[in-house]
Image: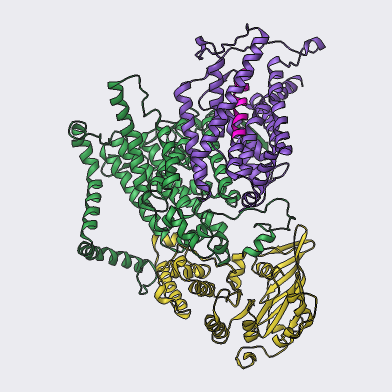
Chain colours: A yellow, B purple, C green
Amino acid sequence: MTAEAGTAPSTPTGSLLTGSIPDPDVLVRARGITKRFGGLTAVNDVDFDIPRGSIVSLIGPNGAGKTTFFNMITGYYVPTDGEISFDGAAIVTRRGKRIRSKKPHEVTQLGIGRTFQNIRLFGTMSALDNVRVGSHVHLRSRWWDSIIRTPRMLNEEAASIEASMELLRLVDLEDRAETWARNLPYGDQRRLEIARALATRPKLLLLDEPTAGMNISETRQLTDFIRRLRAEHGLTILLIEHDMRVVMGISDRVTVLDYGEVIAEGAPDEVRANPRVIEAYLGRGPATAS
Amino acid sequence: MDQLIQTLIIGLANGLIFALVALGYTLVYGIIELINFAHGDVFMLGSMLAFGLIAIISSGGLGVFSITSGTPVLVMGGQIALTLLICMVAMAVLNVSIERVAYRPLRHAPKLAPLISAIGMSFVLQNVGLIFGGAYQRTIDNIFPNTNLLEPLGITSIAITPAQVFVAVVTIPLLLILTWFVDRTRQGRAMRATAQDPDTAGLMGVDVNRTIALTFAIGGALAGAAGVVQILYNNYTVWNLGFRFGLNSFTAAVLGGIGNLRGAVLGALVIGEVNALSDYYLSPNWTQAIVFGVLIAILVFKPTGLLGQQLADRA
Amino acid sequence: MSTATSSIGTGPGAWLGYVGSNAAALPGRYATALRRRPGRTIGLTLVVLAVAVYPVLGHYVLADFSRTVFPLPFPDDTVATFMTIFAIMAIGLNIVAGFAGLLDLGYVAFYAIGAYCAAFLASPHFGALGINLTFMGHVGPGAAGIHLPYWLIAIIAVIVVATFGALLGAPTLRLRGDYLAIVTLGFGEIVPLYFKNLSSVTFSLNLGPINIALQNVNWTGGVQGINPIDPPFLPFFGLVFDARSGPLAVYLGLFLLMIAIVVALNLEHSRIGRAWGAIREDETAAEMMGVNTVRTKLLAFALGASFAGVAGSFQASYLGASTSDFFDFSISILVLIMVILGGIGNVWGAVLGAFALTYVDKTLLPYIGQRIGDVAPTLPNPAEYNFLIFGIILVVMMRFRPQGFLPSRQREAELSVAGLAEAEAGLGLPAALENVEIAPPGQDEVSADARTPETPGEAREL
């Protein structure tokens, strides 16, 4: 199960490790990220870089802080401390003691799209409309355009329908375009969420446990799809995953969180054999050979 | 200066009445996160019932107790006690019935449905008050002697009347009993547990429906008591009394931190003062706007109120 | 959601071309509809014709016939005009509450502001302050006060009310649903109170070059209000659309209503309409997908409010007077009942609800009261206890049919009992009508922008 990453055209060739990625290849740079909720420290002083064009996985036991970290990159949570920059633009900055973060919709505008661990589609809207909401941030029509139906608005609407149908075709849902999201089967819903995230035209795609609840063949299809997203669409992808086959299969680099701290980072095979990682997942006690 | 103190004393008396009603709002919000729009109108109906019991027939009452300033004190005391009992029980029953009819079926509906239902209920109650009480204020003559209890102390520029003492005598023990009940008894603990997390409370053996009904009963009883005090202290009632009192009491509850009992009382006293000061120094025309202004300001700037919420975040 | 799928050009010429081609296609589309669904098409056609013809018919013919030929009274001109006024308001509130899911209990404030716009700008009122300005007004030269034509007043009312809506919404729209409702209720009380109380303003300001001294200025007319207010009028034909004009005012109302319907439908089927739907379904997910929820909700609030502004200005001009007593909380609730009853989220439902409820409140109940009064004078008059009936309607509707009678399909799915069950059967979808709250208490003040609930539990939610 070797990674085929090395053969994809857009994979970075330099170092993939946080802190040693050559500057032009850095898409996300996060330093000293900490998140405290009252007495609980969910994320503790995490440094995290994502190389452009890579597929990076973030793994760790439940409650390790992975989704919290996602939420901070996307602006949903404001970190207690730290700084994050994305493609040169600041998302989280520190001014003295105050931390300022861009709002989620601003982060989306910068080019980060995401899916959710528990699917959050707009249930009573059609699959097509769900995807079209994703394109909201890139449409230029204003409310007055909508009221009087200016040519700009009409052209934009037509174009957005076409573009959204393209995305539905990409995830193999075009014949379900008019079905309400909540009436779709589970696997379709997962793919629809990805299509919606793609509609935001992201440079970085955050996928939160995308294969949860899928069987082996669905998982393999999705894994291939993620590879194609990187290869054909030039996306950088950050994955939270529990399915180790997926993680080992497509990641260029794996970062492991435990209790909110990075305990290991490196190529999939290295991380897999790391005793600290094994301990984090399986607990201390009689050693289990990998 | 004396006028200021006098105004503050008046504000205190009304504040205590607000406190009884505010507790109803805060208890119900604490346990089911519903703004019980109709609560002020339960208070109004309590005062209508009290009016009917107390007022002499020529004033329009039912002539049950017919208390006047001439009634001997012992008899008066007994009759007032009975009135309190009747009104508290009646309003408790009413409140529980309202919960059963208008809110319980909507417990799993989207959040705003029970609120809208509460608004509808409020209108129904107001109209009941309109039908039974008529369109105009119903008044009784003051039954307490109009003396200044501070006179024997040599103070004549500020007055504390027996009526005001009466307010304190009725409200303060009720507030203390309530606090004891919620803090010390098993049922009170059940109420607090249900307020924190109804599902877990249910799993721990708490009968959630009964606990909620109990909460409404207590709120109703307090509103009933407040209604009696209203008639005996302010001497009037009217079908839309509930709106004004409801606004003041709800603002008080929010000011103190909704869900927080001590906060509700504290907030009520503050709002009572705000009312008195605004009535005297500005004009009663503006008082309602000012109280609303306070409410909006709290919700926008410090929604947890003065003493902080005591709810779990269940959104 | 079909729109023209081929690209049209840009610029006003292209727009006119688009409108023109759509208009030209109408007969064809009507014929197709007739062929495909004859029953429905004919039914709708009859309804439209009835509405178009009613004002004239009702005024000249039916008044004589009602009560003798039909068991129920027909609405007279005033009631018919108010039906259109309330329908415009219901459409506006439907945008706020139905499309965007924000409960506004103080809608009457916008209605009042619209009415007073007309009162200020088309009456002798400000003549007392020495402000005289007539521009295409209805009155002769040298008239006291400000006199502008109604169409201009309507536009100004839209702008003024929308601005107030934005000001009101800016600090408050981030509150959770029930708190937002209470705050809007507050504004709905405060604004009319201002109009009622500012009848004698004494104010002086001496700050450098600014020197204002007002002595006992009657700003808003106080309790008596402001009158007379100029009616809407059509100069060339000499038509006046006031309370005495019979069916003319009803037609003007219908005209304004038509514009309101088109605007609302256009908003619904557009980028912002989708954004409103997304926010209503799952505000957090909408924000994460790039929707600026703050701004979008504000737009719903302000745009929805502007409908009330038009309605208010029309009402004041139609009646020729504006009194502050008219604007109270019960009107906010009345319009809300119209939206809920008619069908939440559906523009036509709102119109239907408004027509029905105005008729019941202003014609049917008084009629029943009269009949009862004839027979048994001691029984209560239902017209006086109309809110008892409306209150019961609200409680019953919430219990059994919260989505109303003609809800939009989305809201039906969200709110009906069957819809809720279906939602729960679906996978991991949150129930509708939950709004993101401000930071709950007891958390660390997480620096500048603590805007969302932040608990460890939430971390696992997303």
Residue at 55% in and 36% down: C190
B218 in the magenta segment: yes
Q: Position of residue C66 (x, y in %)?
A: 21, 33
Residue at 49% in and 14% down: B60
A114 above or below B203?
Answer: below
Identify the image quadrant of the N terminus of chain A: bottom right
Q: Position of residue C176 (x, y in %)?
A: 59, 50
Nearer to the camera, A110 or B53: B53
Q: Position of residue A23 (x, y in %)?
A: 72, 83
- Left-right relation of B21 to A225: right
C282 above or below B8?
Answer: below
Name the outermost residue toward the bottom: A7
Nearer to the camera, B177 or B23: B177
Nearer to the camera, C28 or C32: C32
Q: Where are the magenta residues, as a range?
A: B217-232
Residue at 28% in and 21% down: C375
